[in-house]
Amino acid sequence: MAMSKAYVLIETEVGKAAEVATALRAIPGIVAADSVTGPYDVIAVVVGADVNTIGRLVMTEIHGLPGLRHTLTCIVVGESA
C-alpha cells in the first residue's frame, strides 16, 4: 500500500531552528527534519497512511511544538522514478 508524503516548511522563532528540528525527529511519522537556509528555518518530511493522517500529525504534533511560528505543508502528488 502506498504511503502519502508531505514536506512541511517551518518558520521558527529566532534561534530555535535546531531545537525544533531535534523535537520533530522524535515524532513518529516524521522521517527527516533538517535546519535549512532561506525563508524557512526547518524542512520536515512527513509520511502517513493518507493525507488526512498527515494533516492530523501536522495539526496535533507539529503545531504544538514550542518555538514554532508558521508552517506550510506541501503534499506530494506524484513520485518521480
Image (cartoon, rainbow, N blue to C red):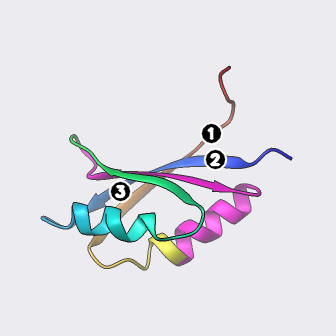
Query: Which circle marks residue 10 in the picture?
Result: 3
At 20% across and 67% down in the image, what residue appears?
Answer: 16
Residue placed farthest to the right in the image?
1
On the image, the x and y values in percent for residue 44 come to: 44, 53
Q: Depth-wise, is mark 3 or mark 2 nearer the camera?
A: 2
Residue placed farthest to the top in the image?
81
3 or 2: tag closer to the N-terminus: 2
**Would residue 55 be found to the left or right of residue 24 on screen?**
right
- Mark 1 = which residue? 76
Please say if 66 is above or below 49.
below
Q: In the rendered structure, which amino acid carries the disc numbered 2?
A: Lys
On the image, the x and y values in percent for residue 56 come to: 63, 70
- Element assignment for label 3: strand
Q: In the rendered structure, which amino acid carries the disc numbered 1?
A: Val
- State the CA–CA distance, disc 3 to disc 2: 16 Å
Residue 11 painted magenta: no
- Element assignment for label 1: loop
Crowding near the residue tagged with mark 1, few <14, some 14–19, many ≥20 C-alpha atoms within 10 Å = few
Look at the image and tell me in which quarter the C terminus lies: top right
Q: In the rendered structure, which amino acid carries the disc numbered 3?
A: Ile
- Element assignment for label 2: strand
3 or 1: tag closer to the N-terminus: 3
Given contact means CB atoms under 8 Å apart, are the residues at marks 1 and 2 in contact? yes
- State the CA–CA distance, disc 1 to disc 2: 6 Å
Query: Depth check: 61 or 32 in front?
Result: 32
- Mark 2 = which residue? 5
1 or 2: tag closer to the N-terminus: 2
Residue 38 position by quadrant: top left
Please say if 2 is above or below 53.
above
Given contact means CB atoms under 8 Å apart, are the residues at marks 3 and 2 in contact? no
Instruction: Provide the residue span drawn in magenta.
Output: 39-60
